[in-house]
Structures are given as C-alpha cells and as structure tokens.
Image (cartoon, rainbow, N blue to C red):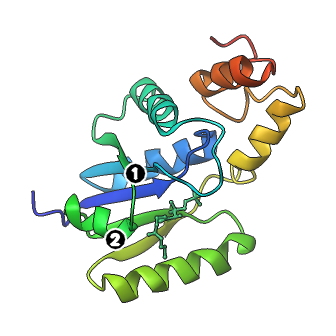
Amino acid sequence: MSGARRAIYPGSFDPVTFGHMDIIRRAAASFDDVVVAVLRNTNKAPLFSAEERREMLEEAIAEAGLGNVRVSGFEGLLVDFARNVEAKVVLRGLRAVSDFEYELQMALLNRRLAPEVETIFLVPGEDVSFISSRLVREIARLGGDVSSLVPACASARLARRLGAPSGGNE
Ligand code: PNS
C-alpha cells in the first residue's frame, strides 16, 4: 500500500477513553487503515506501562469491531514513525479551543520536519468531548466511577491499579 490512505493516530492513551474511541471510529470510517501509535516513553511518568496502554487499546478496538485499525508502540519523533509506516496523515482530536494552541504548534513543527505529512484534526462527539485521560486518572484515584468515561477494559484496570469502582462491566 502506498500509504496515501493510511493515517496514524498518536497519543499517550494513559488510559484510552471513550473520547479516543470516538476519534478512532471516525478515523476508521474515513481512512483505509489506521495505526494507533502509543508513545512508549512519555515524559509524564504514565500510570500504565506502554504494554498495558497498548493492550487496553487492542481490547477496546477489537470490541468495537474495527478491522482496519491496529495498534503500535513508538518512540522518538512522531514524523519518523509516520515515515516508517508510510503514513502521510497524522490525526489528532480537537476537543475545545484550549487544545488548539498546543495542537497548532505541534502540527506546524511536524510540518517543518516532514512537509509531506499532513495533520488532520477530527472533532469528537459532544457527548465525549469533555473527557481527558488526566481527569479520568484523577477521578479513579479519588474513588470515582469512570465506567461511563472509558472502555470496560480500562475501567477494570483502573480499578485494579487504584481501587476505584469498575462499574461492574468486567
Ligand atoms: O496524547 P498526547 O500526550 O497529547 O500525545 C502527544 C504526542 C504523543 C502526539 C506527542 O507528544 C508526540 O508526538 N511525541 C513524540 C515526540 C515528537 O515527535 N515530538 C515533537 C512534536 S512537534
């Protein structure tokens, strides 16, 4: 495949949320194949290891029945990963104006590094656009129920890691 219709969707996914899954569904419907790219060494000291974050994504994607989506870990520059997998499109979700400044900066820097790679922003459904992994972790840490915010596999792992209720889904 030339990669013209291949998109990568990069992120930390610590953990995957229904917001991410909404973007992945939209991506799968718009591109021939989608590579969800999990940043291995985030400098944010992740709650879940790269392996755990990948497993949660794989379970959630299998459950959603998205056959043209695969998950891969990456380290180093995003544009190098895009070139390695022959993707010409980087997808990012844009939830609110507050995301815009950082996303614009990344898109323009990535373009400077790799002009052939286009960043495309997808807008999540308004029912999930307020969800962030950071706040999910905080809610779970404080004992709140996150089962309406993340896939069942993630809420079960959060419960095991942090002792939060899993919502009885798994
Ligand atoms: O889910 P996140 O944490 O907002 O995702 C950020 C991510 C993984 C897209 C970004 O940190 C990234 O691309 N990291 C790889 C290193 C890189 O290429 N940095 C230069 C970006 S201009």
- Label 1: which secondary element: strand
Is residue 46 or residue 99 the one in the foreground? 46
Residue 118: x %, y % from top left? 35, 77
- Find out if the beta carbon at label 1 lies less than 8 Å from the nearest ligand 1 atom: yes
Q: Residues within 10 Å of mark 2 (few under 14, many from 20)?
A: many
* Residue that extends furthest to the bottom in the rendered view of this protein: 112
* Residue type for callout 2: Val
Query: Visible in this render: residue 127?
Result: no
Residue underneath mark 1: 37
Above or below 2: residue 143: above
**Screen quadrant of the N terminus:** bottom left
Above or below 5: residue 50: above
Q: Image point 81% across, 21% down: which residue?
A: 164
**Screen quadrant of the C terminus:** top right
Residue underneath mark 2: 79
Above or below 44: residue 158: above
Drawn side of residue 63 relative to residue 35, left or right: right
Q: Are marks 1 and 2 in contact (CB under 8 Å)?
A: no
* Residue that extends furthest to the left in the rendered view of this protein: 1
Q: Quadrant of residue 72?
A: top left
Q: Residues within 10 Å of mark 1 (few under 14, many from 20)?
A: many
Residue 31: x %, y % from top left? 30, 56
N-terminal label among 1 and 2:
1
* Residue type for callout 1: Ala
Above or below 166: residue 149: below
Is residue 31 or residue 169 the one in the foreground? 169
Query: Visible in this render: residue 11?
Result: yes
Q: Quadrant of residue 49?
A: top right
Q: Image point 55% across, 51% down: which residue?
A: 12
